[in-house]
């Protein structure tokens, strides 16, 4: 028995060099994965590699299937698993009416365990193998999530929501407590197995100035160096007009919404800002200069009626952008659906989101936003073999459309426009099968 697992089938991923994204499509390919480490050893044409590797054992052949890196969802809320599809409100009302009520249940660790497991099963079933998620304010909600992730061997980032005002009392912490609890969680989980901690002030309206400073303190206490990855930071920015007006009332001394975060020391290349729909020119500029990262959440923006983001503008400023589901504001766990709605939002701004770019923003580009592109996002040598196996004939219409596809771009566009979880036939984590439809 060899030390490798061999996977044969069509392969798609993209590579990036000097800012250029290059799609790689191999119609009959072979991927070689080291069994012990779960890392990619080699990817190439089957006809060439089958001469080099012993294909007499350990070969799995995916016929009429496309292997692709697992999706990376850079902005999602696992405690909102059951908030998804809540009727009839905009952001601020939706938070009060649905979200803040549900999140209080996560003080119960058994409930948190149950939802964390359901949530991860749903992600996997949709082909998402990595994510960065908000938890609730309670430490035990983070423990539950990391435990469930570790059990599945997943690469995940998560953090305890910091929130000390403008929310139900039972859901609020205070600046010192949120610092202490976050720090305890960092010591316990950060850089353990494939897990990474994200400092998580929910958004400016629910954090006092004192609390935002504690978030900055954590970011500074756990920087990246050559041996260790630093903690990340996740929050929301410029999602909804009412929210923006509220922030300017709460923080009159800051120039704008992004300025609130920058003034408190939490902008930068480890910080990921969700939404960024209504950014001003000055905010785009400062985001670019501070190398801050962005998660765009099209399904959520449409569901809550928050507005239409400007992808072309983010790109023109050279800001790293990814796509994300934002469940439960978003109404689907499927990154195919997310790409589909992103395409339509771009159309409303008279801009075309090409499929190579869309898939980049849900795989390698998303990994880059989470500072994980050295380990996931594509099939370069030594990357962790988290991949999905897409059934190109999962539905009649997709099958028919793929038959008349001229090239891989056509196929990718069919998938992102017509696809959902039915396309995900199998999911592999570190080269081991984690799901089969
Ligand atoms: Zn969100």
Image (cartoon, helix red, strand yellow):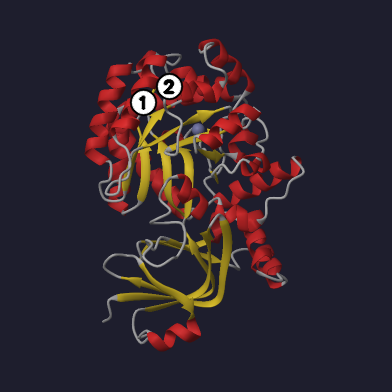
Quarter of the view holding residue 350: top right
Instruction: Please report the residue visible at 39 percent of the width from the left and 55 percent of the height from the top.
Output: 374
Task: Count numbered badges in the picture.
Answer: 2
Q: Check if mark 1's residue and mark 2's residue have beta carbons within 8 Å.
A: yes
Element marked by disc 2: loop
Instruction: Please report the residue visible at 37 percent of the width from the left and 15 percent of the height from the top.
Output: 210
Q: Is residue 76 left or right of residue 398?
A: left
Instruction: Please report the residue visible at 70 percent of the width from the left and 44 percent of the height from the top.
Output: 346
Residue 283, visible in the rendered structure: yes
Q: Nearer the viewer, residue 117 or 384?
A: 384
- Residue at the spot of label 1: 215
Q: Is residue 144 above or below residue 88?
A: below
Image coordinates for residue 129, horizontal then vertical, percent: 42, 53
Outermost residue on the right side: it is 350
Q: Is residue 327 above or below residue 360?
A: above
Element marked by disc 1: helix
Q: What separation in Å lies between label 1 and label 2 (alpha carbons)?
A: 9 Å
- Residue at the spot of label 2: 264
Q: Is residue 333 above or below residue 54?
A: above
Is tag 1's residue or tag 2's residue first in the polypeptide sequence?
1
**Which is in the foreground here, disc 1 or disc 2?**
2
Image coordinates for residue 205, horizontal then vertical, percent: 49, 18
Image coordinates for residue 90, horizontal then vertical, percent: 61, 24
Q: Is residue 306 left or right of residue 252?
A: right
> Label 2 crowding class (10 Å Cα cut-off): few <14, some 14-19, many 20+?
some
Disc 2 within 8 angstroms of ligand 1 (CB) = no
Disc 1 within 8 angstroms of ligand 1 (CB) = no
Q: Is residue 64 above or below residue 166?
A: below
């Amino acid at each position: 028995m060899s030390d490798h697992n061999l996977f044969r089938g069509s392969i798609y991923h993209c590579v990036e060099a000097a800012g250029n994204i290059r799609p790689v499509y191999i119609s009959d390919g072979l991927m070689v994965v080291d069994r012990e480490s779960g890392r990619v050893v080699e990817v190439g044409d089957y006809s060439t590699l089958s001469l080099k590797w012993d294909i007499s054992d350990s070969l799995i052949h995916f016929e009429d299937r496309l292997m692709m890196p697992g999706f990376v969802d850079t902005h999602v809320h696992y405690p909102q698993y059951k908030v998804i599809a809540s009727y009839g409100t905009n952001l601020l009302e939706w938070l009060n009416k649905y979200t803040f009520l549900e999140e209080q249940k996560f003080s119960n660790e058994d409930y948190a365990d149950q939802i964390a497991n359901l949530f991860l099963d749903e992600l996997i079933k949709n082909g998402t193998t990595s994510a960065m998620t908000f938890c609730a304010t309670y430490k035990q909600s983070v423990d539950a999530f990391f435990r469930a992730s570790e059990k599945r061997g997943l690469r995940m980032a998560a953090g305890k929501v910091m929130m000390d005002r403008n929310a139900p009392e039972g859901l609020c912490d205070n600046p010192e407590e949120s610092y202490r609890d976050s720090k305890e969680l960092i010591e316990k989980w950060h850089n353990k197995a494939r897990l990474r901690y994200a400092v998580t002030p929910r958004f400016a309206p629910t954090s006092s100035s004192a609390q935002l400073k504690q978030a900055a303190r954590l970011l500074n206490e756990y920087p990246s160096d050559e041996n260790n990855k630093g903690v990340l930071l996740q929050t929301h920015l410029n999602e909804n007009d009412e929210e923006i007006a509220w922030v300017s009332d709460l923080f009159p001394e800051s120039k704008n919404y992004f300025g609130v975060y920058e003034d408190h020391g939490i902008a930068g290349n480890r910080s990921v800002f969700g939404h960024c729909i209504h950014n001003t020119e000055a905010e785009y500029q400062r985001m670019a200069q501070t190398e801050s990262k962005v998660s765009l959440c099209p399904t959520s923006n449409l569901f809550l009626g928050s507005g239409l983001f400007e992808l072309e503008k983010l790109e023109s400023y050279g800001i790293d952008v990814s796509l994300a589901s934002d469940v439960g504001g978003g109404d689907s766990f499927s990154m195919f659906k997310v790409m589909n709605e992103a395409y339509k939002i771009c159309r409303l701004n008279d801009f075309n989101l090409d499929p190579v770019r869309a898939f980049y923003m849900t795989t390698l580009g998303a990994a880059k936003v989470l500072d994980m592109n050295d380990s996931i996002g594509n099939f370069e040598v030594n990357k962790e073999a988290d991949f999905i196996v897409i059934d190109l004939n999962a539905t009649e219409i997709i099958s028919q459309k793929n038959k008349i596809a001229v090239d891989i771009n056509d196929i990718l566009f069919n998938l992102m426009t017509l696809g959902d979880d039915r396309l995900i036939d199998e999911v592999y984590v570190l080269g081991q099968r984690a799901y089969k439809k």
